[in-house]
Amino acid sequence: MISLVDANNFYVSCERAFDPKLEGKPVAVLSNNDGCVISRSPECKALGIEMGTPYFKLKNTGILFRSSNYELYGDMSARIAATLGTFTPDVEQYSIDEAFLHFDDGAGRRAGGWEALGKAIRARVLKWTGIPCGVGFAPTRTLAKIANHIGKKLPGGVYIMPENPNAVLEGLPVEEVWGVGRRLAERLHRSGVSTARKLAMCGPEFFRRGHFAVTLARTAMELRGIPATEADPVDRENPQSVNVSRMFGEPVTDAEGLSEAVATHASAAAAKLRKAGMVAAGANVFVQESAPPRTGGWKDENWWTPFITSTVTFDTPTAATGEILSALRPAVEGLFVPGKRYRRTGVLFFGLEKEGAAGDLFHDRPSERPASKLSATVDAINARLGRGTVFFAASGVERKWKMKREMLSSRYTTRWDELLVVK
């Protein structure tokens, strides 16, 4: 069984966790350079404020604004992932506010049922981090995404996809299926596929005849309850985060091996950013130890799966591999502990927006900086001669730009001089 855990209004929830005065009020978090709305509280949504609304249009409206505090959000994301690791060692972080949890068939029985397990997950995440979340259970990632979407709207916040999901899929528009973007949905509608149920019924001949990508055929299989997706997230037209993570063929025990793996994953993820025309404000680097968990299981709050994360924010949003590797190197060095055996590592980029949106009048656009031009050249060579033909060494590139963040809250969890003061 697979569970998707998704934090509610994550950026706003992080702000509220440390500033109770924001509870019950319309709150919006702004993008890089305080450009537009990227996270809204329920009260803000009730006012009809759309995602992407420019900040200048909302001044003097009574809405409380916060600049994007990616250092705080990244660290809170890592804390949630670590908390989820107390339920299962197989935590697959999909985005900064979502993670897939993989359970054996007996986990639900041992917990008193899948709903009881879901409620236990929600309660512990809320208790340990202050972040509310929704939980969905299903046999595949795609169905788990749908189950989570339903669960977040329920009073208990948990939904278990029924063994026969046809009734659920029949009422779900195809454009709301994970990985089906607007343009792809338009093609499917023209082919007579308007719901998730109709997509699930499509066979291989339909996808071949319509010249659809193999990923869509896998999505259809997942809707039928057959696991078929890769560990990495499906490409989307406007991703909120991008990650690459892999299990090692055998445990890694040396710093050089771990550093090389992180650099490889970061390079691959950066290439995804550039392909989507995006830049990232920061990244989470995570490692997972291969040592077996201690006895006691998730019901014992002293049981802790060794899942360790470091959060890095970039001085300016970037998709340049050289700049990214330079910024990540100290974090990787800090994560390695001699004598430990590591089973998995990965990199997750967050704070994504279209390239050019984060620039200003006084500095080059991200794509015009030398490091970005070099990355674009490497992408072109690899596209022509094969993936991995040319790759970056983990070397540094000087950074000279700063983001505009005039309403930035404190970095409560990562800076000693910004710790929360209780009076």
Image: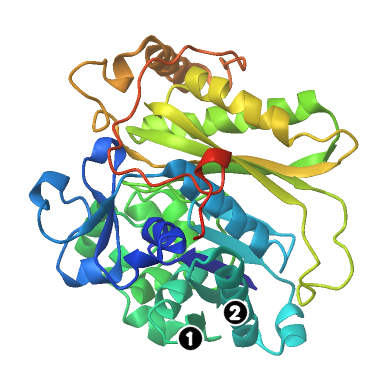
Position of the N terminus, as image quadrant, is bottom right
- The residue shown at (48%, 47%) is 72
Could you tell me residue 372's position as x and y percent?
39, 17
Amino acid type, label 2: Gly
C-alpha distance separating marks 2 and 1: 9 Å
Name of the residue lying farthest toward the bottom: 112
Instruction: Name which quarter of the figure residue 246 lies in.
Output: top right
Instruction: Name which quarter of the figure residue 390 lies in.
Output: top right
* Tag 2 near tag 1, CB within 8 Å: yes
Read off the residue under disc 2. Answer: 118
The answer to whether residue 204 is seen in the rendering is no
What is the crowding at mark 1: few (fewer than 14 residues within 10 Å), some, or many (at least 20)?
some
37 relative position to 224: left or right: left
Marks 2 and 1, the one that precedes in the sequence: 2
The answer to whether residue 209 is seen in the rendering is yes
Amino acid type, label 1: Gly
Could you tell me residue 328's position as x and y percent?
58, 28
- The residue shown at (52%, 67%) is 130
Read off the residue under disc 1. Answer: 156
**Residue sitting nearer the eye, 168 or 80:** 80
Which SS class for mark 2?
A: helix
408 relative position to 255: left or right: left
